[in-house]
Amino acid sequence: MPKPIEILKKEVMRKTIHIAGAAVPVSYLFIDRSLMLAGLSALVMSAIVMEWARLNGRIKLADLIRQEEGKRVAAYVYFAVASLATVFLFPKMVAIVALLMLCIGDSLLGLFGVLLLLFRRSGRADVRTKRFGGGGIIRDVKESISAAKDAELMLLMLLICFLIGALLIPPYVAFMGAIGAMLADAIPWQVGGRVLDDNLTVPIFASVLMTIASPF
């Protein structure tokens, strides 16, 4: 069983890459929709080719993906697809904020979730690789982090995403988006018996609620 500090090191590396994905919504601030869609289409095709090569043993990305992603589609593919879908389906500012909530909000919360393992009082968590919410950041820690802690993480996700959104759009619209991001991350949404990856559901759920609430 990996030690908490080892989990933290790997999580920091993965989340650093995840945060770097914020370059996608930030770049959208400065370019038009058609150019963004062209770039994201190329990104999706590249991700699919890379994932095909990984799943067929042509390349190795062991340090960049989770153990449970070894034989299934990895998170970066869902991120690329979600980015393309979000930009295509929703207004520009809604798409930008939703993707920032995913790249920054989800990443910061993931790191916070691991830190809870390092600083809890007992210090003997049995961490499993399964993630609460079918890809969400709230970790399944055996007999250590209680449901109350899970609720704390959900509220923290709400707060972080709200603050991100409120910098760019009206606060009430940002709050609706934060609710969508939190619900997408915390609940194991399923389609046809398959749990949806949060890299897909967070920006979509946030975008839908922000579009309903937004004046633009």
Image (cartoon, rainbow, N blue to C red):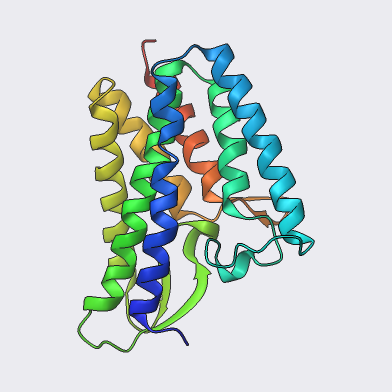
On the question of residue 137 being in view, the answer is: no
**Displayed quadrant of residue 26:** top left
**Displayed quadrant of residue 29:** top left
Measured from the top left, where is residue 74 in percent x and y? Answer: 62, 55
Measured from the top left, where is residue 73 in percent x and y? Answer: 68, 55
| Farthest residue, direction right | 56
**Displayed quadrant of residue 186:** bottom left
- In front of the other: 205 or 25: 25
Measured from the top left, where is residue 212 in percent x and y? Answer: 44, 21
Residue at x 70% of width, y 60% of height: 59
Question: Does 113 sit left or right of 137 as displayed?
Answer: left
User: Is 1 situated above or below 90?
Assistant: below
User: Is 53 situated above or below 162?
Assistant: below
Residue at x 35% of width, y 70% of height: 8
Residue at x 66% of width, y 36% of height: 44
Measured from the top left, where is residue 105 in percent x and y? Answer: 34, 45
- In front of the other: 136 or 110: 110
Question: Does 192 sit left or right of 196 as displayed?
Answer: right
- In front of the other: 69 or 163: 69
Residue at x 51% of width, y 73% of height: 129
Q: On the rendered image, what quadrant is the C terminus found in? A: top left
